[in-house]
Image (spheres, rainbow, N blue to C red):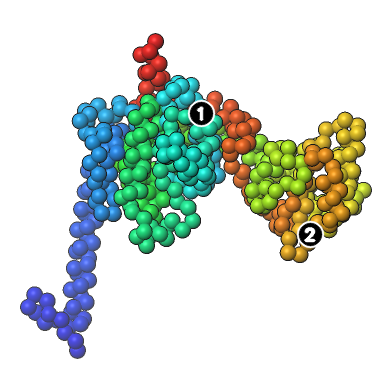
Amino acid sequence: MAATTVCGNVLSSRGHQQVCRSLTVASTSLRKSSCSSLTSSCSPSPSAYNQQCRSKSTASLFNDDDDPNSYNHNNNHQNNNNSNNKSNQSRPIYVAATKQHVGKTTTCLALMSGLKKRFPNSIGYLKPVGQQHVPVYSDTLGKEIRVDKDVTLIREHFKLSHCDYKDMSPVLIPSGYTKDYIDGKISYYEQLESIKSAVSNVYSRNEVVLCEGTGHCAVGSIVGASNAKVASMIGGSMVLIANGGLGSCFDELELNRVLCENHNVDVAGVIINKVLPEKYEQTKDYMSRALEQHWGVPLLGCIPDKPYLGCPALADLERLFKTKMISGEGKRFQHYTVTDINLVTTSLTRFLSNMREKPSRTLFICHVTRDDIILGFLGEYQRRKKNNLPFEAALVICGRSEKYNLAKELRDMIDFQDDDVPILLSPHTTHHTMEMIHSYTPKLNIYDMGRVDAAVHHYEKYIDYDMLLSQTGNALCSQRAASSS
């Protein structure tokens, strides 16, 4: 029988197992006792924790001591000298969502609009970590660089010429970046220094700075630059954005709050988007009370849903299908509700009848082999034009490009029309095209200013800006304006 020596005594295997079990039980008991004691004496409630964060967050502005290698940059740009009144010091407003497609960028547009009214020449914006990017020209660098697409939208829409592009999108995570980071080709430290430098530069020119995160609080964790991590590093206060609801909404918020707590990030408040209009007052009342009771933070905004903002324009479908309109380019920013999409499987007679009975702005979908439907669509356009009737319908012609092609004769007829008939090709089956449109969430962009203006106008009136500024230690209006007057 195998034997084991413990403290000079030789034990059999059975004796050895009994000793191990005894040691395990004793260790577990001691650990539970210690944890219980620590929990009861050291763990603050979320509400109390937020108060602690507010007193600490500015002390750690531009300092970082929470990374894989205990890396600590002693950037003395804003040091610990003001430790006695940090809770009242201005902090960056960091915006993150609970998941995709909750209206984070739309909320940031509304926040920028309201804040710019209070700080006309001293509001700054950046997106520390971006993903989808576009080329722009940097005046400071004197060359073309790439920045997150939302940065272009915000900078151009609000004319933030005092903020240079190079500081507004310091870190981009394009395809392949994560693998390069894990392979050691990208420096963790240089990433963080780029973000710190950008925030410092933007802050030096502005009284209030809005930072837009990418997705939920954990996005970017694999490269050491999650939203919670970055917010902690720059001493920011987090504003969480979630979709309407109560139970599931709060659950999603709680997951993100816990991550903020783990990184010592103060949660300044919450904004709830896309609330059903008939449940607006109920959601606002209960969510306000729940946040105050559980977290000790306010509901900064409760936004009723506006379906138009989620309606795709023909320009959105161009991007979705990776194609271009073959006619009616001037109608690219006409929007169509998903409920007004009609797949044509009927006869020509029934189709023409539908065109005259259905709402004028209907998106029709047909297969490329339906020559009769395509000709009927062109004919109806001509009839309405002759009678000075509005024509807002559009046609998506579907067919796998490797198998079907639009007949040359039909293409010639389309080209012969005035460039006022909205027609788009989809290189997919009709079924797949319908599925793609129904599952698509259109994003705000710099070209569709009609939808951007509508979004800002709708959201802005439901946000409490004074509460937001107070919660983040910012003045309620520009001190520069006050001193100049």
Q: Is residue 288 above or below residue 29?
A: above
Q: Is residue 260 visible?
A: no
Q: Residues within 10 Å of mark 2 (few under 14, many from 20)?
A: some
Q: Quadrant of the N terminus?
A: bottom left
Q: Quadrant of the C terminus?
A: top left
Front position in the image: 141 or 254: 141
Q: Is residue 139 above or below residue 189?
A: above
Q: Residues within 10 Å of mark 1 (few under 14, many from 20)?
A: few
Q: Which residue is mark 1?
A: 159
When asked about the image quadrant of residue 448, the answer is top right
Q: Which residue is painted at 52% across and 38% down in the image?
A: 152
Front position in the image: 294 or 194: 194
Relative image position of residue 49 (x, y in whole percent): 31, 38
Q: Is residue 3 visible?
A: yes
Q: Is residue 403 above or below residue 196?
A: below
Q: Which residue is painted at 83% across and 39% down in the image?
A: 418
Front position in the image: 375 or 243: 375
Q: Which residue is painted at 36% across and 55% down in the image?
A: 186
Relative image position of residue 76 (x, y in whole percent): 23, 36
Relative image position of residue 47 (x, y in whole percent): 34, 36
Q: Amino acid at mark 2?
A: Asn
